[in-house]
Image: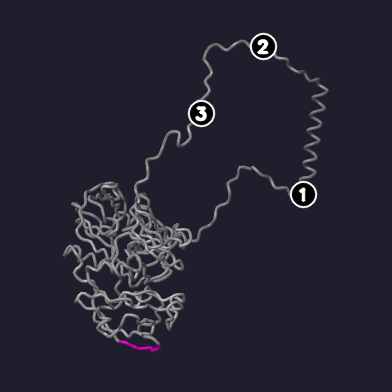
Amino acid sequence: MSQTSYPPNTPASEPDSSMPQLSPNVPGRPPAGQQLSPYPPASEPPPPDYGAGYGAWPPATVTPSGPTPPRKPSRAIWIAPAAVVAIVLLLAGAFAMGRTFSGSSVTRTGTGQPAPTVAVPPSAQDLQQTIINVINTVQPSVVEVQGQSATGGDIGSGEILTSDGYIVTNNHVVEGAQSFTVLLSSGKQYPATVVGTAPQDDLAVLKIAATGLQPITIGDSSKVQVGQFAIAIGSPLGLQQSATLGIVSAVNRTADEGPGGARALTGLIQTSAPINPGNSGGALVDLQGRLIGIPTLGASSPQTGGAANGIGFAIPSDRVKFVTDQLIKNGKLVNTGQGFLGISGQDVTPQLAAAYNLPVQSGVLITGFANDAAGASPAQTAGLRTGDIITAVNGTEIASSSDLASALVSQSPGTQVKLTVHRGSSQLTITVTLGERPANLQG
């Protein structure tokens, strides 16, 4: 499915307040209203204030040195021996009373005994140690990407792909910057150059002049399951080599980085592992330390506009490998390998249906067509028209553009799909042979 192109970071004119809004995870630029708009990477935090900011201690009171002055005679109060005896008797009586009442249950406090510890089952200890081992194994393959532009500096993350210095990150991490520095986990810094970018996949490849690096192990994202553990590693808010833990919350999500789905990312992995500005381009790995995705987007609340905790999205590793192999070899994406329907559309809502007397309450209304890599719209070639409403693909219900994109994401060019279409009062079944999504398509 095609979407209309748009200027980068242009907010949507009519956001859908019913769904969580998404914002890419790189600091610098603020999220564009209700739409996904690349976060600029997080700038490095200011150096800590070791002075009054931490609370200055008051100066110690100093007593001048010198001879000790003679003491004045004290006015001591002398206690008669009889009084001393009386006090001793009173104390003894109090002690006896204490022994008398000690028969009741009395809990003593302030004994100085430490609180009891909790016995941890061996299985939990093993899981904890596994997570520690994964983080220690993966960190040398994760880098911090620092970009400089005329307006300042931004920070994102990246992964080492090859031992001779090819590094993958998000396109929105490098977009708009003129120079780049890569900071390794060892603390070494290298200048970096851009090898190639794929804006429609939000991926880019950098190169540094280094050897003997530790490439990350790339896993098979097609085998990722909802509920499995996931660890995100990167530089959120410029805090290098930070790690967070969560699970895979969902797979095959679709998110839009532009208004009206102008730059749709499909097949995304949703995770509860906290990701923040600066995590973009970093690593989402499984408990074997294999890359399963690249954190790219974070959700924001449509009500407050603030971050929606525990909802982040990552580009699946299978797509990362497919794109980066081409960028390293050709400097650009030669073929997308993605099926292409060739329409632009609008989500049908009950309000829209009522306003225009549409025959259905949900689906995708075709508003125009777009050409595939061969220069034609497969949908238009198959006989679809503007005004048609797509409500199902191969029998699976389609309620929105996101549903349509998800239904087509795993389809290869040349695949035939059956669309259920409403045209006026008629319902039709139209077979479309998918084309190939153009490599230079921005939407």
Q: Main secondary structure of the magenta part?
A: strand
Q: Earlier in the sequence, mark 2 or mark 1?
A: 2
In three-dimensional space, the C-alpha distance between marks 3 and 1, rounded to whole angstroms, equals 48 Å
Q: Give the number of marks.
A: 3
Q: Earlier in the sequence, mark 2 or mark 3?
A: 3
Q: Residue at x 37, y 42 (%)?
A: 46
Q: Earlier in the sequence, mark 3 or mark 1?
A: 3
Q: Residue at x 26, y 78 (%)?
A: 412
**Which amino acid type is marked by label 1?**
Ser
- Secondary element under disc 2, as helix, strand or loop, is loop
For the magenta stretch, what is the residue range? 425-430
In the image, 71 versus 426, the foreground residue is 426
Residue 375's image quarter? Answer: bottom left
User: Which class describes the residues within 10 Å of circle 2: few (<14), some (14-19), or many (20+)?
Assistant: few
**Which amino acid type is marked by label 2?**
Lys
Mark 1 = which residue?
104
In the image, 375 versus 156, the foreground residue is 375
Does residue 88 appear left or right of residue 178 in this picture?
right
Q: Is residue 229 above or below residue 212?
A: below
Point out residue 8 in the picture as x, y percentages from the top left corner. Answer: 30, 60
- Secondary element under disc 1, as helix, strand or loop, is loop
Frontmost of labels 3 and 1 is: 3
Mark 2 = which residue?
72
In three-dimensional space, the C-alpha distance between marks 2 and 1, rounded to whole angstroms, equals 51 Å
Frontmost of labels 2 and 1 is: 2
- Secondary element under disc 3, as helix, strand or loop, is loop
Q: Which mark is residue 58?
A: 3
